[in-house]
Amino acid sequence: MGQKISQALAFMNNAETLDEKVLDACLKEVCTALLQADVNAKLVFGLRTNVKTRAANADKGAGLNKRKIIEKARARTGAATARQVAALRATCSMGSE
């Protein structure tokens, strides 16, 4: 799961432009990896909705570069997302043992 998510994020990071098509492709890969790892579908849907909402809000700052938009969206997701990621990592590491 971690490798698929890393690949999806690398694809997004290497894209020339960060548009809706690139974001949708990245989210599709990330959500697929999470669902394959048996993450609750409600959580995956919530994550997808949250990212899309934050990306739409980031469009308001059209003068910002791609990296700043990503950093701003990450900062806004707050500690809840960090806890979710930590829980997912813990779940993944327990499943690989």
Image: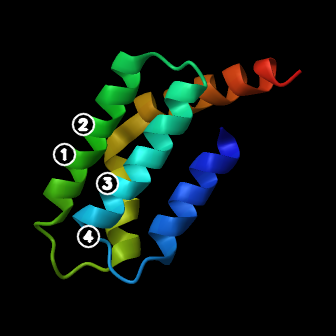
The amino acid type found where label 4 is placed reads Asp
Do callouts 1 and 2 mark residues in contact (Cβ within 8 Å)? yes
> Is residue 15 toward the left or the right of residue 65 in the image?
right
- At x 35% / y 75%, what residue is drawn? 66
Q: Quadrant of residue 90?
A: top right
Q: CA distance from mark 1 to mark 2?
A: 6 Å
Q: CA distance from mark 3 to mark 2?
A: 11 Å
The amino acid type found where label 1 is placed reads Thr
Where's residue 97, x and y in %?
89, 21
**Residue on which disc 4 sits:** 19
**Residue on which disc 3 sits:** 24
- Circle 2 residues within 10 Å: few <14, some 14–19, many ≥20: few
What label sits on residue 53 in the rendered view?
Answer: 1
Element at label 2? helix
Element at label 1? helix
The amino acid type found where label 2 is placed reads Thr
Looking at the picture, tell me which residue is in the foreground, 94 or 79: 94
Earlier-in-chain disc, 4 versus 2: 4
Q: Quadrant of residue 50?
A: top left
Earlier-in-chain disc, 3 versus 1: 3
- Residue mark closest to the camera, 3 vs 2: 3
Element at label 3? helix
The amino acid type found where label 3 is placed reads Asp
Quarter occupied by the N terminus = top right
- At x 56% / y 18%, what residue is drawn? 38
Do callouts 4 and 2 mark residues in contact (Cβ within 8 Å)? no
